[in-house]
Amino acid sequence: MRDLRRDGVPHGNLPLELDAFVGRATELVELARALDSARLVTVTGAGGVGKSRLAARAAGRRSPRHGVWRVHLAPVRDEEFVDYAVVEALGLTDHTTRLPRETLLAHLAGRELLLLLDGVEHLVDACASLVTDLLGRAPGLRVLAVGRRPLDVAGERLVPLAPLGTEEAVELLTVRARQRGGVPEYAADPDADLREVRELCRRLDGIPLAVELAAGRLGALSPGQVLRRLDDRFRLLAGGDRTALPRHRTLRTAIGWSHELCTPPERLLWARLSVFSGPFDLEAAEYVCSGDGLAAEDVLDVLTALLAQSVLTREESPTGVRYRMLDTVRAYGADWLEATGDADRLRRRHRDWYVGLATWCELEWFSPRQDEVAARVDAELPNLRSALEHCLDEPDGAHLGQYLAGALWFHWVGCGRLSEGRHWLEQAVRLEAEPTAGEQSRLKALWVLAHVAILQGDTVPALAALQECRQEAERSANPTAVAYAEHRTGCLALVTDDLPRAETLLRSALHRYREIGELNSNVLMGQVELAMARAFQGDLPDAVRLCEDVRQVCEDHGERWARGYALYVLAYAAWSEGDPVRARELLADCLGGAHRFRDQLGSVLAVELLALVTVAEGDAAEAAVLQGAAGRMWPSVGLPLFGSAHYNAPHELCEAAAREQLGDERYVECVRHGARLGRREAVARA
């Protein structure tokens, strides 16, 4: 990704261009002028005409103060997830029950940025509603939309994109063919070959995707051979009259022609790959798409051939090499998959792969691979959503949906996705699963739902889910679910200041965990929560003992997430014992881990306590700035400091000391300065 930074903070997510941008100079100027004069610009045009590439190129030339942010909407199938997709692209986290639209409005207020919505045509109503709200309440926002249809929003400026002219199309064909090791050097008969290349580009109507597909064939065929094969198909479809073929059918014809030239294994893999939503890796393709005529060991060779023919694109990601199929090409493959009658089987294999991936990720979360797991689930989210939808829509898939939603607890809770997690969990627990197959999965979904609701400050539904989980777990003699229900009930008591009850429940839950041999990040968090309860009741030595034990177990297993909360408690104890230097050291470590996982709760707790340490060190102004930064973060977390008198005590002590040293006016000024810092800026400063 292009890492646009200002003051060490990322300001955009536009990817670097991996190959040469060809032509479109006039269109770039027109689009730049449109963006200068209108706050909403929509680039429209037929599929494959190059809208996304042009928009990304134009956006990359701009430099709004808070960056350019691209949102890929092609993998989004449900209008309900448009807002989530934008939240995700902006790297925002929100632990509250607020709708994602409210999160976006709060974030964009007072910011100056360009939002690139790429692929709006199948989500026009949802995108129009979102854009109208955002532009109406965020004066520094500009939106560049890309789609085959306009949004029909007041103030929208349209920039229709036509196909390439013949000479630009020739240049594109030549550049792409050479990149793929093909001709055309036009050595044997330069004039004749160039005439055939021009004619080929004319027959393709200058549609860039069609030209790229043709370029992928120039390694094996001459320009004349490509032209003759394509021309035969045009004549067949148009009844012998080339002029009768409408331009909007040219791309599908070119895709179909490219499909016909594929070998049977290539056509088979093309169709099967259409089940993926968004990027996928080789291992997923080998599992999902192999069998019935395509061996797993052959998938790489066939995939490589599709890559060479521009049916697929390759991209680097934090999780390694991934592949993507353009939506138009994917739709063509999906039609073929339906025609084969194999679509349901492929969707089940896709679901099974991602259920298995979630299982692996949950196990590996308690390991040195936590960072890798967090990045992997982020990258796979479009496919995991598809798998969840498939599970929850299938009459016999309820228990798998409950299992998958529950298995991803670490992502919902530890990586800043509480709102989306709650959406899936609530859907899952409403479904009736088979008693034997779904009982364990539903109980887990219930306690995970309760955990999410507790962190969102929504205590009534949390308590209802825990009571149901506990009752059903006791009825079915399920000791694991009983332990988790008791643990989360203790957590609820902790954040609502019922410390004696919290301690009793948490100790009992930890005892149950030991009896059944359960050890993972959740169990360690139970011990941290018990330590917090002991610290709030004045027993700092016991709190330190508990958290040092957690710290040691985390280091033995390579666990970083629960370790961060243990460090927070140890820092609280260090400050209480008059050692601000050690407290700062522990909090810096804690904050780095929380920020890495996008754990907003861990981040804001660390910043709050760091403010108190800072004022103890004598820098009241910086302490007030940090309190202001924390104050801006809390609305995305929930009720500030859970509404807990115990969690709030350090905040009140810091404010009282800072006001005394600075005076009210200077204190308020510093807090306002901190409130202007975003989460990344605040963490970088701390």
Image (cartoon, helix red, strand yellow):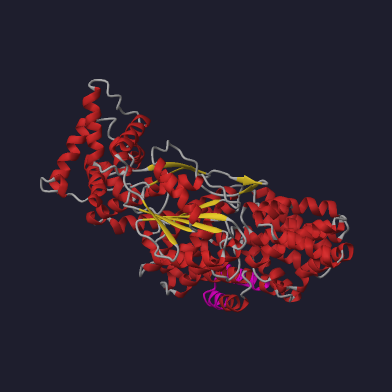
- Which residue is located at x 36 percent, y 43 percent? 312
- Image spot of residue 83 (x, y percent): 49, 64
Front position in the image: 425 or 178: 178
**Is residue 40 at least partly visible in the picture?**
yes
Location of residue 358 with respect to 311 vertically, above or below: below
- Which residue is located at x 25 percent, y 23 percent? 190
- Image spot of residue 222 (x, y percent): 23, 29
Magenta residues: mostly which secondary structure? Answer: helix
Verify whether residue 475 appears in magenta: yes
Residue 562: which quarter of the image? bottom right
Q: How many marks?
A: 0
Front position in the image: 450 or 363: 450
Tell me the magenta residue range. Answer: 468-490
- Image spot of residue 665 (x, y percent): 83, 66
Residue 662: which quarter of the image? bottom right
Location of residue 638 with respect to 313 vertically, above or below: below
- Which residue is located at x 70 percent, y 50 percent? 684
Verify whether residue 67 appears in magenta: no
Judge from the rendering whether residue 252 lies leftward or rightward of residue 671; answer left or right: left
Judge from the rendering whether residue 403 lies leftward or rightward of residue 607; answer left or right: left
* Residue sticking out furthest to the left: 240
* Residue sticking out furthest to the top: 188
Judge from the rendering whether residue 140 lies leftward or rightward of residue 400; answer left or right: right
- Image spot of residue 154 (x, y percent): 44, 66
**Is residue 222 at least partly visible in the picture?**
no
